[in-house]
Image (cartoon, helix red, strand yellow):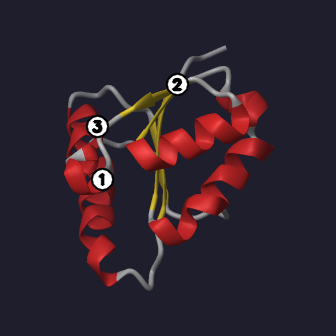
Amino acid sequence: MFLLNIALMAHDGKKELMVQFCIAYCGILSAHTVSATKTTGKLIADATGLDVNLCFSANQGGSQQIGARIAYNEIDLVLFFCDPDDAAGQTSVNEIARLCDRHSIPFASNVATA
């Protein structure tokens, strides 16, 4: 089995969806290394028991931490459940998506693509 480094992020309006996704796929995620921004990661860890490596909260630099890990080829997959109605949060989504495109990292922005 191939071990992946998976980054999980979610806008406030999509955090519950991310938690439900992680509950459904806990068996698969448990076989990999999971990192997340702080609030999202805590919610996931509490709901699933997964060991989640926590970055800062997104508004305190967590998006930049994950972005740096993408740039240094330390992330293999990004799941960023974004809220299209959150105009302020679109900058971070675009930055992460652009980095993933630049470094050929799979990127899912919603549950259907994840």
Q: Position of residue 49 (x, y in %)?
A: 69, 28
Q: Could you tell me which residue is drawn at 68 percent across and 44 percent down?
A: 22
Query: What number is the disc on residue 4?
Result: 2
Residue 97 visible to the viewer: yes
Compare marks 3 and 1 and give the one earlier in the sequence.
1
Q: Are marks 3 and 1 in contact (CB under 8 Å)?
A: no
Total numbered badges shown on the rendered structure:
3
In the picture, the disc for residue 70 is 3
51, above or below 10, in the image: above
Residue at mark 2 to residue at mark 1: CA–CA distance: 22 Å
Q: Nearer the viewer, residue 101 or 24?
A: 24
- Residue 62 vs residue 78, the one in the foreground: 62
In the displayed structure, would residue 41 be above or below residue 29?
Answer: below
Observer-nearest of 105 and 16? 16
Check disc 1: other Cα within 10 Å, few if <14, some if 14-19, many if 20+. many
Give coordinates of residue 69: x percent, y percent: 26, 32
> Looking at the picture, which amino acid does disc 2 mark?
Leu
Q: Residue furthest top?
A: 1
Q: Amino acid at mark 3?
A: Ile
* Image height of 35 relative to 20, above or below: above
